[in-house]
């Protein structure tokens, strides 16, 4: 195993009244080249932590919240690297949804077990928060909780709320908290979409952030600390990346992609996810059980009229193809359904959230069988009842998108305070 040893940690600034936040490196991320064609090589927070000799963890009993995405640039898992390094006293691993080693499907986890590769105890954090999660940290015997998970850039991707819950629980348990940063795979250029109404808070959205937040996990940790966890702030530090710029898509980083969850197989999936995941809140398939989850959408009885209506919207950066597919699991398992496939031709111009709204509007208008899930899951995904009620009332794409303009502008102003790159 080889770990890049270049670079050192340097001090950053404070977040909130009681948070000392260490940002490795200062100023704009420097461009680096490496790999084929001179592609810039991004070094993650973990690679920089290791390069600095794990100085942030000296004298600490360490536990790591991670999943299969917590890897080095050499595609070796950080738990395996740290366990083999005598400079780190790694004593526990904490697994989120889908588990530490990634064996569970959506809505599942691996439970409590001892990791066969390292012998380390693995504790389950999924659906735990507050004092019960704090009790897990206390029972593990750790002094510092480290977080390293690849995000997908959408408010309803649950790992960022695992981050939030773990920060709150670490504060209750009196533990330090260290976030190792990774790229936002869909860039960090801007936030978009509706902002959560706290009345609709769930594990797919704890606090009022935009549907596509445009932040890295370290930036989100700073925002959570500075805006939402002020009553009992955790002792927070972050190790930032080097070489990453806000306009970078994942393929510009030179990093290996590991699916953060079973239905996020490629960085291209992440590009559409913040919009098309809204179909989880309907009776249409969002493409789970296919090789193109969130890029294929459909249901029994849908035909070419949906693709025609969606293309007529003229949404930037994307075209829609009439498509037929048979999911191997989830909605319509084993049945052939009709629908659309998204084909991005200009990812710079593409707006995932606007596209998702346009597809909902046209699906309802072109297919008489359209229905929302009975549990109003769409309200939890969008953060309020507004999207559902406006579409039901006949609103078009532009009208729905315009309805969140003011709240989005306010979130963008808050967001700027916590950006690192």
Image: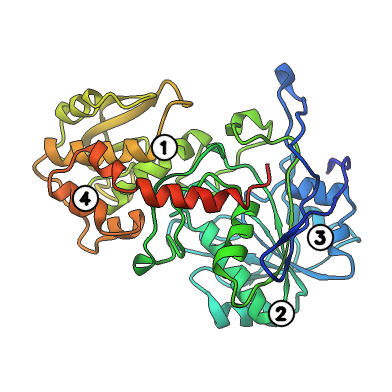
Q: Distance between the Cα atoms at labels 4 and 3?
A: 45 Å
Q: Earlier in the sequence, mark 3 or mark 2?
A: 3
Using the image, determine if residue 187 lies above or below residue 219. above
216 and 28: which one is in front?
A: 28
Q: Distance between the Cα atoms at labels 1 and 2?
A: 39 Å
Horizontal side, residue 216 vs residue 120: left or right: left
Q: Distance between the Cα atoms at labels 1 and 4?
A: 19 Å
Q: Residues within 10 Å of mark 4 (few under 14, many from 20)?
A: some
Horizontal side, residue 309 vs residue 31: left or right: left
Q: Residues within 10 Å of mark 1 (few under 14, many from 20)?
A: many
Q: Distance between the Cα atoms at labels 3 and 1?
A: 36 Å
The residue where tag 2 is placed is 174
Q: Which mark is residue 283?
A: 4
The residue positioned 69% from the left and 36% from the top of the image is 244
The residue positioned 66% from the left and 46% from the top of the image is 182
The residue where tag 3 is placed is 83
Q: Distance between the Cα atoms at labels 3 and 2?
A: 24 Å
Q: Which mark is residue 272?
A: 1
SS at mark 3?
Answer: helix
Q: Earlier in the sequence, mark 2 or mark 4?
A: 2
113 and 191: which one is in front?
A: 191
In this rendering, the label closer to the viewer, 3 or 1: 1
Report the residue that reaches farthest toward the top.
Answer: 37
Quadrant in which residue 167 is drawn: bottom right
303 and 49: which one is in front?
A: 49
Do tag 3 and tag 1 residues touch (Cβ < 8 Å)?
A: no
Horizontal side, residue 107 vs residue 305: left or right: right
What percent of the width, then of the height, locates residue 131?
57, 83
Do tag 1 and tag 4 residues touch (Cβ < 8 Å)?
A: no
The residue positioned 33% from the left and 35% from the top of the image is 355
């Amino acid at each position: 195993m080889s770990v890049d040893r270049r670079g050192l940690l340097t001090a950053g600034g404070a977040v909130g009244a009681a948070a000392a936040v260490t940002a490795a490196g200062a100023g704009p991320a420097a461009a680096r080249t490496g790999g084929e064609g001179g592609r810039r090589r991004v070094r993650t927070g973990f690679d920089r932590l290791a390069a600095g000799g794990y100085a942030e963890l000296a004298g600490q009993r360490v536990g790591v919240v991670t999943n299969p995405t917590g890897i080095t640039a050499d595609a070796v898992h950080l738990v395996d690297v740290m366990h083999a390094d005598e400079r780190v006293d790694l004593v526990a691993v904490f697994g989120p949804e889908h588990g530490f080693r990634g064996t569970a499907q959506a809505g599942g986890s691996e439970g409590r077990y001892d990791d066969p590769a390292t012998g380390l105890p693995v504790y389950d954090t999924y659906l735990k928060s507050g004092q019960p999660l704090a009790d897990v940290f206390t029972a593990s015997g750790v002094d510092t909780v480290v977080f390293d998970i690849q995000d997908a850039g959408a408010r309803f991707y649950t790992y960022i709320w695992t981050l939030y819950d773990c920060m709150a629980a670490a504060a209750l348990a009196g533990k330090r908290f260290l976030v190792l940063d990774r790229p936002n795979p869909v860039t960090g250029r801007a936030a978009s979409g509706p902002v959560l109404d706290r009345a609709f808070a769930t594990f797919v959205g704890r606090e009022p952030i935009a549907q596509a937040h445009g932040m890295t996990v370290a930036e989100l940790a700073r925002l959570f600390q500075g805006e939402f966890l002020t009553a009992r702030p955790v002792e927070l530090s972050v190790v930032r990346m080097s070489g990453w710029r806000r306009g970078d898509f994942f393929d510009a980083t030179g990093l290996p992609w590991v699916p953060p969850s079973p239905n996020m197989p490629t960085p291209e999936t992440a590009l559409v996810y913040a919009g098309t995941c809204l179909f989880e809140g309907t009776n249409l398939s969002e493409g789970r059980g296919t090789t193109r989850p969130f890029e294929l959408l459909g249901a029994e009885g849908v035909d070419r009229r949906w693709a025609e209506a969606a293309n007529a919207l003229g949404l930037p950066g994307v075209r829609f193809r009439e498509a037929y597919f048979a999911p191997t699991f989830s909605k319509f398992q084993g049945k052939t359904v009709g629908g659309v496939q998204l084909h991005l031709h200009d990812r710079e111009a593409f707006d995932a959230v606007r596209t998702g709204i346009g597809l909902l509007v046209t699906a309802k208008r072109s297919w008489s069988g359209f229905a929302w899930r009975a549990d109003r899951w769409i309200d939890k995904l969008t953060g309020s009842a507004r999207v559902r009620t406006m579409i039901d009332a006949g609103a078009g794409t532009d009208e729905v998108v315009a309805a969140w303009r003011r709240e989005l502008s306010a979130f963008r102003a808050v967001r700027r305070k916590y950006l690192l790159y």
